[in-house]
Amino acid sequence: MNTNLNITNSEYDELISKKAKKSPIVKNIIIAFIVGGLICCLGQFISNQLVNMGVEKEQAATFTSITLIFIGAFLTAVNLYSRIGKVAGAGSTIPITGFSNSVVAPAIEFKSEGYVLGIGANMFKVAGPVLVYGITTSVILGFVYYVFNYIF
Amino acid sequence: MDILLEYGKVFLTGGIICTIGQILIDKTKITPARILTLFVTLGVILGFLGIYEPIYNFGKCGATVPISGFGYCLYKGTVKAITESGFIGVFTGGITATAGGIAAAVVFGFIASLVAKPTIK
């Protein structure tokens, strides 16, 4: 092992950068882009089908969310979503299917702690903060909107 | 061709939003849970500033399927409720607009937890 110790610092740096694995960030980004884009296309496909079937546009949007949430919940239940997540990263976290996963996964994980304090209490472990900050922001900005449009 | 262009825009918009999330995960110490929270809040703020509307008009589901679209939906619902029923809409609009998604996540989550077995980590 100790054959090559007589090298300078710069030679050593060169050696290390040659041997070190390239940071996978570019690969991560490309996969996140593709997976995220595909999930959105699936949503668009579902939405288009519903509109073609004569569903009103706003209802179609809600139905699309519910369908994607179902798909996310199903894939979580059969233990596939976490495997997709390992490869896809933000590509599977950011879409609404990832939100669904964040609700379903802790519900399953804490099942053994009981129906109320296990499933019930842990379901919103991640989704809770999402709702807290989302709703708070929307009420505050809604108030600002109201003040500017109806009082002034 | 129109349909290809439509899906291309959806793919591009959704892809870029997820890419921003991935860069934040890789380049900072922000955890995915914080990313979700950040994106929802940003969706509300961008909706308020009138920036999310053109993104939605361009990318359709590419803008609504990512969690930032959930925030946009919260804000849009609030404005709609204010227009329809005045001040009370500030409080009722957001959750009304997103009720379907929240209820679905809770119910599917509950059913899944009854059916699925926890995996050993």
Image (cartoon, helix red, strand yellow):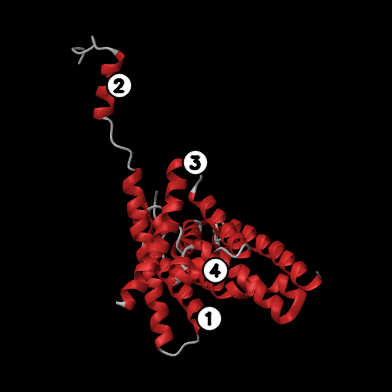
Marks 2 and 4 sit apart, C-alpha to C-alpha, by: 50 Å
- Helix, strand or loop at label 2? It is helix
* Residue A58 disc label: 1
Furthest-right residue in this view: A151
Whether residue A60 is visible here, answered yes or no, is yes
Query: Residue, x 28% and y 35% (percent of image)?
Result: A21
* Residue B72, image quadrant: bottom right
* Residue B53 disc label: 4
Q: Is residue B36 left or right of residue B23?
A: right
Amino acid type of the residue tagged 3 in the rendering:
Lys
Q: Quadrant of the C terminus of chain A?
A: bottom right
Circle 4 Cα neighbour tier, 10 Å, few/some/many (<14 / 14–19 / ≥20) = some
Q: Are marks 3 and 1 in contact (CB under 8 Å)?
A: no
Q: With respect to residue A55, does B91 lie above or below?
A: above
- Helix, strand or loop at label 3? It is loop
First in residue order: circle 1 vs circle 2: 2
**Chain for disc number 1:** A
Q: With respect to residue B39, does B74 lie above or below?
A: below
**Chain for disc number 4:** B
Q: Are marks 3 and 4 on the same chain?
A: yes
Marks 3 and 2 sit apart, C-alpha to C-alpha, by: 26 Å
Marks 4 and 1 sit apart, C-alpha to C-alpha, by: 15 Å
Name the residue carrying label 2: A13
Query: Residue, x 62% and y 68% (percent of image)?
Result: B75
